[in-house]
Image (spheres, grey):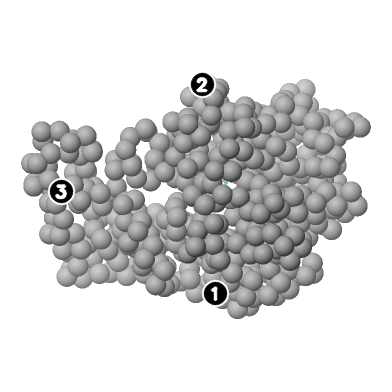
Amino acid sequence: MPCIDGKTYIDRINQLKANVWINGQKVTGKISEHPSFKGIIQSQARLYDAQYEADTKEATTFISPKTGQRTGMSYLEPKTKEDLAKRRRAVQTWARQSVGMMGRSPDYMNTIVMTFGAAAEIFSDPQCIANMRNYYAYCSENDISLTHTFINPQVNRSSIYFEDPSEIIAAQMIDKNDKGIVIHGARLLATQGGVTDEIVVFPTGAVHLDDSYAYAFSIPSNTPGLKFACRESFDYGKSTYDHPLGSRYDEVDSIIIFFDHVTVPWNRVFLHGDARVASTMYTESSFLSHQIHQVISKNVVKTEFILGVLQSMVDAINVGEYQHIQEKISEVIIALETLKALLVASEVNAKVDRFGTMTPDKKPLTAATNIFPKVYPRFVEIMQLIGASGLVSIPGEKDFQSELGADLKKYLQSATKDGYEKVKLPCLGHFVKRVRRAANAL
Ligand SMILES: Cc1cc2nc3c(=O)[nH]c(=O)nc-3n(C[C@H](O)[C@H](O)[C@H](O)COP(=O)(O)OP(=O)(O)OC[C@H]3O[C@@H](n4cnc5c(N)ncnc54)[C@H](O)[C@@H]3O)c2cc1C
């Protein structure tokens, strides 16, 4: 089938009726109408709609030579440097829909499935190799949305820790039978857990002496025995005026994923019991290069958004003449230009890996992925330093609608905006359009 639109995504997720828990309650009814999930599901649906819209269709999709169908661009296995540039443009086109705030939009896992589909031979066992290749084809041909878990619960991170065999915590493969492998225990953190078609479960990458932790597979989110427990949502049920980002883009992490004697059918098993493959699959494949290429492409857009909001704040209260303000804005510009340069360098120096996939150079990408977590807290600090009292002078939409409204509009005005418009600034999200225009020009 061709790539999906937003309605198809929402219908599929609702039909799953996955076992999802939040605030001590099981989600019943349509998850797309649940107060904690409706914002992110709508935002995700908009990404899929972009695959059909005139101005974003070409950037986000391609015609698969294998099926002749229009397919999501993040499933494209790059063979040339131009393919890498196409992938970057697709990631950034989607990221602009969420101003870079959706860290695990579907292109993230599509990229990982593409990487392992192309490098399937690392799984060693002929059936597992075929399963991984088939799964890549299945996901790309049906535009399957995926969450993932790659780590174990945070019980004891000592390098000499071995779990008590009488009490399984970290999910283990406890059996193999004619139907498949049986998984029991828990895994940690699946962003978007419960709002995707399927979940991919990969080993931690650590050296395991015990083969029962050496497994990799994927199953539908509604598989019997599978349960997602989510953290509280940052969508407080308020208007998009009051919480422009949380109400739209909170991806609601599943903090624990329970596997209660879950049977994974053989055709979905990519690895079972080969500890060597479990500890080398991330380094033997080009996983990191492609994963970070997606992440940094997205983070460039996120940085553009922050820069746009900061510039809007500077303009609103007219502080652009001060040198320390110019220096602070310059810091963000320097970070943005550094990320963009490293991303381009990774494409210029890309090479075909041993599986035939054009792979971005990991060195500049690794530099970028180390820089971003250091500069992002500084962006937030700069926002606080420039915004000053403006960051707490933020009455809600209901206050503006009350009899105080006229006074609030008047007394909270700025050099260029009335109070209602100015208060939008610290609330960030209303500059999406403006930032999108700026980003398109880059
Ligand atoms: C918001 C959010 C979303 C996430 N989403 C996902 C997801 O969708 N899928 C997924 O698989 N994971 C997800 N994760 C989990 C993420 O992969 C882990 O947080 C990350 O790998 C770190 O593991 P940890 O949190 O268990 O920290 P730990 O490994 O427990 O580390 C705790 C501390 O101990 C230190 N430490 C631990 N081991 C060592 C060691 N061997 N040597 C030196 N120092 C050590 C660490 O540096 C750290 O300071 C998410 C995490 C967050 C915060």
In this picture, residue 303 sits left or right of residue 403: right
Taking depth in this image into account, of 341 and 144 the one nearest to the observer is 144
Taking depth in this image into account, of 165 and 6 the one nearest to the observer is 6
Q: Amino acid at mark 1?
A: Val
Residue 419 badge: 3
Residue 344 badge: 1
Q: Residue at x 39, y 62 (%)?
A: 436
Q: Tell me if I can see residue 3 in this picture.
A: yes
Q: Is residue 35 above or below residue 205?
A: above
Q: Residues within 10 Å of mark 3 (few under 14, many from 20)?
A: many
Circle 3 sits in a helix, a strand or a loop, which is it? helix
Q: Residue at x 40, y 67 (%)?
A: 439
Q: Amino acid at mark 2?
A: Gly
Q: Tell me if I can see residue 111 in this picture.
A: no
Q: Residue 231: x and y, percent?
A: 50, 32
Q: Toward which corner of the image does residue 172 lie, by quadrant?
A: top right
Residue 399 badge: none
Instruction: Single out the residue that lies furthest toward the bottom.
Output: 348
Q: Residues within 10 Å of mark 2 (few under 14, many from 20)?
A: few
Residue 24 badge: 2
Q: CA distance from mark 2 to mark 3?
A: 39 Å
Marks 2,1: beta carbons within 8 A: no
Q: Residue 368: x and y, percent?
A: 52, 65
Nearer to us of marks 2 and 3 is 3
The quadrant of the picture showing ligand 1 is top right
Circle 2 sits in a helix, a strand or a loop, which is it? loop
Marks 2,3: beta carbons within 8 A: no
Q: Is residue 168 above or below residue 134?
A: above
Whichever of callouts 3 and 1 sits on the residue coming sooner in the sequence is 1
